[in-house]
Image: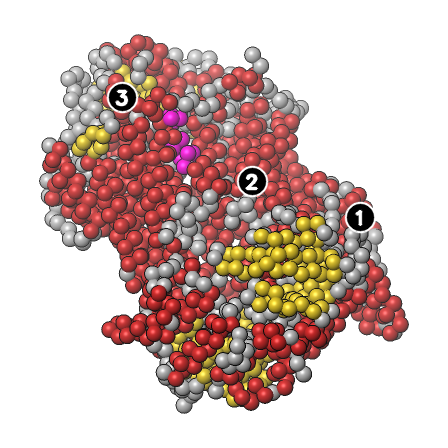
Amino acid sequence: MTSARNESRRPHLQQLGEWWNSLPRTRQWLVLIPVVLLIYALPVLNPPILSTEPGTNFPIACFNAARFALIALGLNVVVGQAGLLDLGYVGFFAVGAYVAALFTSPDSALAKLPYLVTLPLAMVITMFFGVVLGTPTLRLRGDYLAIVTLGFGEIVRLLATIVPPLKGQVGFQEVGHPPGRLPDGSLIFASSNGTPWYWLVVTLTIAMLMLVGNLERSRVGRAWVAIREDEDAAQIMGVPTFKFKLWAFAIGAAIGGLSGALFAGEVGFVNNQKFDVPTSVLFLAAVVLGGSGNKVGVLLGAFVVSYVPDRFTELANYKYLIFGLALIILMIFRPQGLLGARQRLLAKGREAYQRLIGRPEQVSSESALAAESAKGVGA
Amino acid sequence: MSGARLVRVLTLAAVASLSVAGCAAKTNSGDSGGGAGSNVDIPVVSQLPVPPNAASPAGSGNATCSGVTIAYAGAETGPNAQLGINILNGVQLAINEHNQANKNCQVALKKFDTEGDPGKAPGVVTQLVSESDIIGVIGLPFSGESKATGGTFQQANLVHITPSATNPALTKNGWSTFFRALGNDAVQGPAAAKFIVDKLKANKVCVVQDDSDYGIGLATAANQALGDKAKDCQDKVTTGQKDFSATVSKIMNAKPDAVFYSGYYAEGAPLDQQLVNKGFTGKFVAPDGVKDDKFLQLAGDASGNAYFTCPCVPGELLQKFSDAYKGVSGGQAPGTYSLEGYDATTILLKGIDSGIKDRAGLTNYVKNYDGDGFSKHFKWDATGELATSTVYGYKVDHGKIVYVGTIS
Amino acid sequence: MALLELSDVSVHYGRIQALCGITLTVEQGEVVTLIGANGAGKTTTMRAISGIRPLSGGRIRFQGDDITRLRADLRVVRGISQAPEGRGVFPGMTVQENLEMGAYARRDKKSVPEDFDRVFALFPRLAERRSQVGGTLSGGEQQMLAIGRALMARPRLLLLDEPSMGLAPQFIQQIFRIVTEINEQGTTVLLVEQNARQALTRAHRAYVLETGRIVKSGTGAELLADTSIKEAYLGVA
Amino acid sequence: MHPLTTFLADAWINFDVGSLRDQFWSNTFDGLTYGAIYALVAMGYTLVYGVLNLINFAHSEVFIVGAYAVFFVLSGLGFGPSAPALSIGALVADLLLAMVAAMLVSAAVAVILERVAYRPLRRKGVPRLVFLITAIGASFTIQYLIFIWRGPSAEPAVIMFRPEAVFTVFGADIDDQQLTIVAAALVLMLVADVFVNRTRLGRGVRAVAQDPDTATLMGVNKERVIMLTFLMGGLLAGAASLFYVMKVPSGVQYSGGFILGIKAFAAAVLGGIGNIRGALLGGLLLGVVSNYGQTLLGASQWSDVVAFVVLVVVLMFRPTGILGESLGKARV
Amino acid sequence: MSQETGLQEVPDEAGEEHVQVEGGIVAELERMTPEERAEHEAEVAEVVAPDREIAVGFGETLLELREVTVRFGGLVALDAVSFGIRRGEILGLIGPNGAGKTTCFNAMTGVYRPTSGQVLLEDRPLGRRKRHQITRLGIARTFQNIRLFGEMTALENVVVGTDARHRTSVLGALLRGPRHRREEAEAVERAMALLEFVGIADRAADKARNLPYGYQRRLEIARALATEPKLLCLDEPAAGFNPAEKEQLMGLIRKIRDDGYTVLLIEHDMRLVMGVTDRIVVLEFGKKIAEGLPAEIRDNPAVIAAYLGVPDDGAA
């Protein structure tokens, strides 16, 4: 990626952003509804250029991408919005997956629950884990926090390996799934049928987008960004920083847990193998690639991280190398990610700006992670 | 001795830390130490009786068919690729021989890479199943991925023969499309025990298992058969472990005649190597998961005390097969499960040659199949388990894995 | 030829311009002072001269050579030495080590002991505290150490950034006396000060900075008599 | 019984106090050996952190690359999975050669890393987190380059010599391997300590660590000092890799640096990051403690879990570590 | 798809679009007659004015420092400093660089805890309260080196200030409960008024980091005012200003006081301090050396000595 290309793309993206900003709400809906419908129809359409077949079944590739999108959305709350680098996000993902497995798999000694009940349960339990991890560690400085969370992710994986009731590599078979059968008697939510799972995840992702969006455009979202930009100043402006950091951690954890439980349900099998640090870094790459702090950006990043190895199966062996290199190159040349940070922090911001100055606010493409630098210069 | 040792320590430490960049000429040729002091010698068997009427893929040469495809699904990349490639080459060889002999029946081969990952396999298999020209499948090689995908094959009524997945539970899922071209762990475990007790004359055995489904299942079966001989010496290791000093000292204290390691070569090799380097002189017995040239490479001279059990046939002893195989593999000799892959493909090809064009037909054909292959006699029971199966014994001899005859 | 020459120097911090075209000269043997309010750009000027802050425009010449793009550590070798604002004493090093750091870039190691003697003669206090760690010195002692350390480089031009800051009066007196003494020993001094009267009294010439620009210059005495200066720095009309 | 009770009553953690009691001293000595290795690697984290205030996440790969160099040199010299029969002189010469090669390779990787990945960022003055992400990217890149080159499995073991007990203390054997590693590591750390605290260049390093701008005003070339710290960290990591291969002969694998790197970082934090003597103290302590944990809890992974828990606890209660932070204050 | 916004908006809001005014209020203001403008400004001032219960009466001591000492290691930054700030006044805190002004300031706003002594707000000691709690109690400040939230717009920065008085819970924000909506609407209203009040409404929609220096300084003041402080502390608000800008700033500070706030001003520029403050406290070497009316301070020999420096070799 050369800087020349960046220059030419940036105004373009910015124009698009400004155009979108200038549209009235109703028009935005007119554009959005067909886009959303198109997203839902994707696995059925299986468009030839996009299709990942014959390497990977396209609906399942779609499910994977959607699952990554949900993960990225959750991690973005922590990394992008609150500016807390979490390298152990896979730990929450794992806890969610194990919750689903422990309560639905016949291999578990625990009472059986309907699969759909385990989704909110997974969120509650991972949230609890988020609070337990966050309470002692969120006072730490950014990079220490990153290493401690990395340690947490590894501890979850190691415990899954060495604590007998979690069944290590043997794992749990026949993890549950939502009920329902097709007319021919086969399961709707079968492991082999990606489409219903995809729709479920897309629906939950949209719901989470709305909820996280609500948070963003409230004192909570503003507190997060303020903490990210300058934690001391935020405190002095009356932001209870610890409380809101903990909330970011807990909410991010809950979404991670939800996606873990969904993953467990779709694959139908949970063991200790897929919750390692490389997976965690892949999650981080999804967030950073598209632009941490930008919800659309992280969705895009998640799509790239999940789709590229599925589509170009010959690259499968190289995927970690590719994303590792991508992280270096991106940080050097475009630390804000492909789209850059983008947040709206006021519920009625559009109206306010229109009333005050007759135009929408600036579109930014700065890095959400770059905020800390201001401190370095100042102090 | 201790004085000289101390001198060496001090010299090492001092020289090392001063980092004097001098380097001396090299005068080393690794000794053969290690000491697999074998007091029991099992002779090498260099002949493998081939069933006279073993089915060959070429068949009669006048089959007609069109537009049918056989698929291979399994690892081509990823950490467990080698096993998959062994099988794939066997499959490829069978298809080649068939298509060469039968000009009017060209069967296509499609390959699907699962990376051996139970998380990835469902997506791959779902895709495979959706391609309607595929009427038979060889795969999947590993138990975990087989477990994750058996239902998908079942739904599509698509027959798949695994040449290497040995978990006994796989045939207990009620799948009618799953067939296993070799004996399962429930057969191999007791066979290994028998081998250790009867052939190696061991009275005291340590059983070390890894944390995989495979390792645990096999160890359980072997322990049952070993009974009192192994009851005092048990240990566990985990996948990815590098340092086995705790396990090694446990074994050294127990002083067993043999160690049965139930797992894969990645941990088995360093374990054996560390045992031998600590002065262990007993036998090291391990199942098919360890029987691999990689074991020899990783354990080096220490591998001299190793014996293997495997429900697999030594394909390399079939000269004709071995030569033909090298043509496909680019010079590599047949590996573990190459011949099973070859035989399983032959069965599917015979079905196609008999005029079958659809999945249901081929499933039915395999279900009722009864005939010799190069590796063994193939006839399945209702669950997809072979009616009779044999376990074969191997040992390491002069840096090579050699066949020592059947066990059961 | 002036010893130091800044022409039209501009410096930006991000988008904010801290210096907008400063032009000034320091002649061999002079004491020149820069005065101005907080945020006027005095420290930025010093950092630009010593090379820690890159210029966004203009030139700097030292002994006739263009040093605009010269690396900061090489400027020390050329003879520009600075006692920075806030002293910048290395807190974990002893007084001795701090002074040795001052001679870090020196090529003529043999004459370093002479300079130790010279510094200890100027600041006997430092000799007493030779093996004390920098972080535990008092503010005045730290300032002496910072100046002494800068002298250890045997500079042609000594940059002093607010040497009186936070010091008790007796120390301020002493520091300024020493500045004069150093100058009389032959070192050219560029001094940034808040303590306008002291600075103007000691300086041969002075510049007044306001929001990144030089608004006035003249001899120390001239500026000391200037009513607008009095007004700005004491509020007396 | 209620399923939840069964689940919870299942053996989650077994404390094997008996084993720990029996093996206490042998655990201690072995832990010190691992600790010496952690300490050498921790030096790399501590030096870079001291000077740049940044965690060089890719240092674990600097280390593992050294281990590969050891593997290749020793394999080339005929070492393999069994101990060779060599005279002491020849053995020392071979090991020395391997160590020098590993030190050079590791140092080269560290310096290249600094130039290619970190320097451009420093020039831009990016915040710490961006730097950390780059470092993670670099760590990944190196790991998977090795993966593609050498494949997923570990390299065959290279045995340098078979450890033999030299003397017995508290009923536990101390072998020549343990002595070699601990002694050599101590000497190397001492050399590093003397370099940083007693030489002119070392003073430059400390000056940059304490106040980079002022250090520049003293004529210290900051870029060169930074390069030097990466170089030193690389050299020590390379030396550590020889001892690592000595101790864990089958440990040469693409991902083999990761856990060790985290443990070394934990050791650095435990001792007080940025503090050279702290790295030694932290390394030895962590080695011993995680070894106890492993024996007490009964699986080798517990060693890692214990290390992580130590890291979290230290950061929670004394984030400056036992000896306190900062390179320059090491002498206090 | 480039922006996501529409997605999360609740549809029922789509209906109430505002009448589009070309250029908005800012442009409209330009077109107003002086009377209309005065009326508008009065409205703005009304919205900005503090609407809080304050326990002390006008002219009584609002905040008091009692023998406050702050030590860093061996260094005494503040040495038993005592003074009070009366409600409704502008108090100047001056002293040479390094005299302890900022330390004093930090001790008041909870950034440092005094080593000994007490800070009392409305006769109640601040004690060991956290910084954000102190803000909620009613002390707000600006920073010497501007510390805005650079990625937020000017308006958003100010709304963060108003959030100090908000009580919406995370759940309330998640589900957009009635309190959230009410607080949100009020906050934007007040924030817009504040931007107008300090005179930077025309750049309300710009990222703070893209604002000109002078705007950033004033935005800091607006953000601090948004927390509805009983006491507003300004830390060198005129640093880097030219005389014309300083003049404007003096006007603004007076306007703030006239609107009902109490102001503490740390400043270097004597002209500004003398021009705007009601009383002045002078610090030197961490000690209070004088306190009084500007005119008294101006003639105080100790202050003159501290500022201009004692004449050569004169007595200290």
Front-most of residues B331 and C47: C47
How far is mark 2 from mark 3, CA to CA?
A: 43 Å
The quadrant in which residue D79 appears is: top left
Amino acid type of the residue that numbered disc 2 sits on in the rendered structure: Gly
* Residue at screen point 27% across, 55% down: D194
- Where is D300 relative to A234, above or below? above
Q: Secondary structure at mark 1?
A: helix
- Where is D140 relative to B184, above or below? below
* Residue at screen point 85% across, 70% down: E37
Q: Residues within 10 Å of mark 2 (few under 14, many from 20)?
A: many
The residue tagged 1 is E182
Give the magenta-colored segment's residue range: D296-307
- Where is C147 relative to A175, above or below? below
Quadrant containing the N terminus of chain C is bottom left
Q: Chain of mark 3?
A: B
The residue tagged 2 is A134
Tag in front: 1 or 3:
1
The residue tagged 3 is B251
Amino acid type of the residue that numbered disc 1 sits on in the rendered structure: Arg
